[in-house]
Amino acid sequence: MTTRRISDEQLIELIEAAIFVADKPLSKKRLKETVLQDIAVSNTRVDKALDSIFEHYQTRGIRLVEVATGFRFQACASLSPWLSNLFQEKAPKYSRATLETMALIAYRQPITRGEIEQVRGVTVSSNIIKSLQEREWIKVVGYKEVPGKPALYATTKQFLDYFSLSGLNMLPRLPEQHRVKIDQMLNDPSVREPS
């Protein structure tokens, strides 16, 4: 198979169009395996093209963003009050219990259901865990080596994508007093994993 050469401008147009029409974020690897498979292009040129696209959209109503699974276009957050009128469906409302559970998993992963209950002080509903798994925001990443071998939960790349994060390091910092309190609760020897 012969490889074609294209100009930097054509490369930018091709990558921009590919990201625009893709139904999910496109990673550099996926770009190279699909739309760029028979084009002679280095990783450096792909990076420069992405930088150029990123820069071009800085003053527009949409932005090129990198999330956990690749690159995608999304509307500027500042425009959401007006853009929300386009959508009939209301964004789902999450209970405090769901948000607390999700936050504990995101900040303390991997974490067991028992540890979540230890911090929250109440039982975690099976429906909460099930709904977070159905949304593909959390998954079982292993089992804790204690009696009963409880599942260890962690967030997924879909969770990061949904919240426009490229990694967990982009989560807002947990206030120090909250982090210390959670550490104390999780290290309390009087509370044990259920067997």
Image (cartoon, helix red, strand yellow):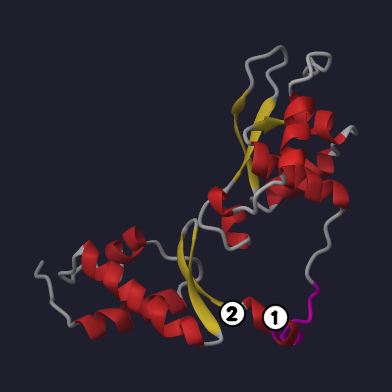
Disc sitting over residue 42 in the figure:
none
Choose top left, top right, bottom left or bottom right for residue 181.
Answer: top right
108 versus 2 height, above or below: above
Tell me where the magenta segment starts and ends, as one range: 83-90
Mark 1 = which residue? Answer: 80
In the rendered image, the vertical position of residue 38 relative to residue 16, given as above or below: above
Name the residue located 50 percent from the left edge and 66 percent from the top edge.
Answer: 24
Give x and y (percent) for residue 68. 50, 56
Dividing the image into 4 quarters, which one contains the N terminus?
A: bottom left
Q: Which residue corresponds to the image point at 76% horizontal and 49% vertical from the top-left?
A: 131
| Residue nearest the viewer, comparing 182 with 161 | 182
Horizontal side of 45 relative to 25 (left or right) equals left
Q: Is residue 20 left or right of residue 143?
A: left
Mark 1 near mark 2, Cβ–Cβ under 8 Å?
A: yes
Q: Amino acid at mark 1?
A: Ser
Q: Nearer the viewer, residue 60 or 46?
A: 60
- Left or right, 43 with respect to 81, comes to left
Q: Which mark is residue 75?
A: 2
Q: Is residue 67 above or below residue 104?
A: below
Q: Residue at x 67, y 28 (%)?
A: 151
Expressed as whole percent of the image width and height from the top left, the position of residue 103 reads 73, 46
Task: Name which residue type carries label 2.
Answer: Ala
Q: Is residue 89 magenta?
A: yes
